[in-house]
Amino acid sequence: MALTDYQTLVDNLVRDDAGKLSAVDRDQAIRVAVARYSKDRPRPMVEDLTAPGGNLLSLPAGWEVGFSTLNSLEYPVGIVPPTLIDTACWGMYNAPGGLQMMVRDAVPEGATVRASYTVTHVVDVATDTIPETDREPVASYAAAVLLDQLASFYSGDSDSTIQADSVNHQSKAGEFSARARGLRKRYFDDLGIDPKRNVAAGVVVNMSLPDSRGRDRLTHPRRFR
């Protein structure tokens, strides 16, 4: 399924019979949906790197600055089960020549280090990296973006001086807005994603600390901790 298939699917979901949306609008909505999906389900990549010797490693060739995340480093390579460098022993380092990876224990020159990281998904005329089971949810998100645009168009259209026509526009705005919410919910539901997951959450923690003199607190002695 390449870009043309997404275009057809999105057109079928939107059904813009009035022709308010252009092909450019549709393709932009598909790009927005792919970008959103990339954040929710980033594309995993694995690449073998040749160590220059020492504690620094160059980023993988496919690394996307501003998006990619390093998941793991394997060294030495080829051992079963895989020998992963502990996450506390590597990190990202801003060197004068650009971003690099730093490991606590030096790696010999010429050694192979296997990096697992993430990149964005690609959908164009020849390539589609989105799993088949997730293609319809992505198209649904793109359609929701377009339906939001139609809702905005009709809710802000004040050219008409006929009251009945104005009411009709408001009715259309509400219809498009409801359809957009439904398709966006379909995207989250199909992928099993909580859309509120980025909302800050609080938690109550019992620190079980003594008082300023190092003694038990009156209402919270050690025997109850």
Image (spheres, helix red, strand yellow):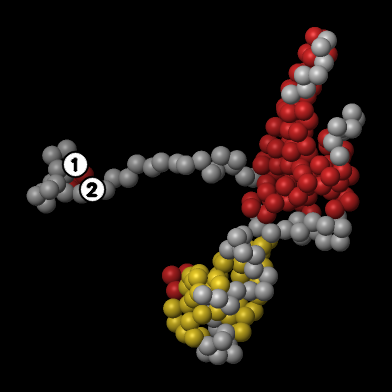
Instruction: Give the SS element for disc 1.
Output: loop
- Which residue corresponds to the image point at 9% horizontal and 49% vertical from the top-left? 213
- Above or below — where is 147 with respect to 156? below
Q: Local crowd at mark 1 within 10 Å, few (<14), some, or many (≥20)?
A: few
Q: Is residue 85 visible?
A: no
- Above or below — where is 206 with respect to 155? below
Q: Nearer the viewer, residue 56 or 38?
A: 56
Q: Position of residue 199 (x, y in %)?
A: 51, 40
- Which residue corresponds to the image point at 81% horizontal and 19% vertical from the top-left? 159
Q: Which residue is mark 1?
A: 220
Q: Nearer the viewer, residue 138 or 60?
A: 60
3D distance between C-alphas at marks 1 and 2 = 8 Å
Q: Position of residue 166 (x, y in %)?
A: 79, 14
Number of residue marks? 2
- Above or below — where is 120 with respect to 83? above
- Which residue corresponds to the image point at 20% horizontal and 49% vertical from the top-left? 209
Q: Amino acid at mark 2?
A: Ser
Q: Earlier in the sequence, mark 1 or mark 2?
A: 2
Q: Which residue is mark 2?
A: 208
Q: Nearer the viewer, residue 42 or 79?
A: 42
Q: Position of residue 6 (x, y in %)?
A: 84, 48
Q: Position of residue 117 (x, y in %)?
A: 61, 67
Which quarter of the picture shows residue 22? Answer: top right
Q: Local crowd at mark 2 within 10 Å, few (<14), some, or many (≥20)?
A: few
Q: Which label belongs to residue 175?
A: none
Say which quadrant the N terminus sits in.
bottom right
- Which residue corresponds to the image point at 59% horizontal and 90% vertical from the top-left? 110
- The residue at the far top in this view is 163
Q: Are marks 1 and 2 in contact (CB under 8 Å)?
A: yes
Q: Amino acid at mark 1?
A: His
Q: Is residue 189 visible?
A: yes
Instruction: Give the SS element for disc 2.
Output: loop
